[in-house]
Image (cartoon, helix red, strand yellow):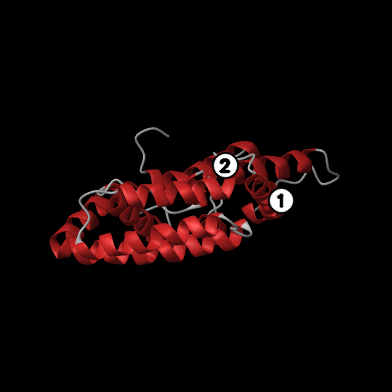
Amino acid sequence: MSGEDPEAAYFQSIEEFFVSRRGDPLMLSNADWVLIRSWRQAGIPLRVVLRGIADALDSHTHSWSRGQKVGSLRYCAAEVEAARERREQALASGTEGEGGIPGALRGFAAALRGATGLGPRAAACAQALAPTLEARADGPGPAREVEAWLQSSEQGLLECLAQDAGDRVEQDLAASVEADLAPYRSRLPPRVLEQVREDGRARRLLESKGLPRLSLFHL
């Protein structure tokens, strides 16, 4: 997958893994692509999704219905959810990532405090968000709630960064995203393309200031 757009690679990696494990060519349906999109929106990392797909297909291989091909990625949804729950338990216990969820939140806070070259709106946003992240690290709560909160917090930070950047920078970012999307436009449904587009813009905007995505997805 080297050289591919990192956001689109999430979708393509899942497609390729499912098709290869299934054993014969299969075009994913729009419903399958939307399911992958829901996993990405929920912040489920690629390795967790692939683990769930592998578990589902391994189970099918030893089931009474093993002579029938799995026709949809939806068949794997329950095992993907189970793999997600195991990961969330590992995050809560601190056995996944460096320090689990509290360590991640403190790391995000440190990145915001150490950021340089921020415009006035982004600097104010970062200064306000950093202590909030540190405070939540003392009692973060369930991973799903933390992820939703981080996504909302990141959106506010992105809005501040965009306001400071101005229209010209935004246009350049959009052009860069569209150039990377070119190989995928004929394959990915519009809603999936929009997800990839949003993720690509967010990554580039944050990277331009040396900031990480605020998400447990990347742990």
- Furthest residue to the left? 168
Residue placed most toward the observer, 79 or 44? 44
Disc ID at residue 99: 2
Residue at numbered disc 1: 82
Asked whether 3 or 151 is in front, the reply is 151
**x then y, percent, for residue 106:** 47, 49
Q: Residue 29 placed where, x, y %?
A: 55, 57
* Quarter of the image where the N terminus is located: top left
Tell me if mark 2 has few (under 14), some (14-19) or many (20+) residues whose alpha carbon lies within 10 angstroms of its own: some
User: Can the viewer see residue 23?
Assistant: no
Q: Position of residue 191 (x, y in %)?
A: 43, 64
Identify which amino acid the numbered label 1 is placed on.
Ala
Q: Nearer the viewer, residue 85 or 120?
A: 120
Residue drawn where x is 45% and y is 62% of the image: 132
Question: Mark 2 and mark 1 in contact (Cβ < 8 Å)?
Answer: no
Residue type for callout 2: Gly
Residue at 54% across / 52% down in the picture?
A: 28
| Category of crowding for the residue at label 1, using alpha-carbon neighbours closer than 10 angstroms: few (below 14), some (14–19), many (at least 20) | some
Find the distance from the CA under tag 1 to the CA under tag 2: 22 Å
Circle number at residue 132:
none
Percent coordinates x, y for residue 161 in the rendering: 26, 61
Apparent side of residue 152 relative to residue 56 in the rendered image (left or right):
left
Nearer the observer, 16 or 152: 152
For residue 74, say whether it is visible: yes
Q: Nearer the viewer, mark 1 or mark 2?
A: 2
Asked where in the image residue 19 lies, by quadrant, the reply is top right
- Dot 1 or dot 2: first in sequence order is 1
Of helix, strand and loop, which one carries label 1? Answer: helix
Quarter of the rendering containing residue 158 = bottom left
Secondary structure of residue under mark 2: loop
* Residue drawn 42% across the image and 55% down it: 188
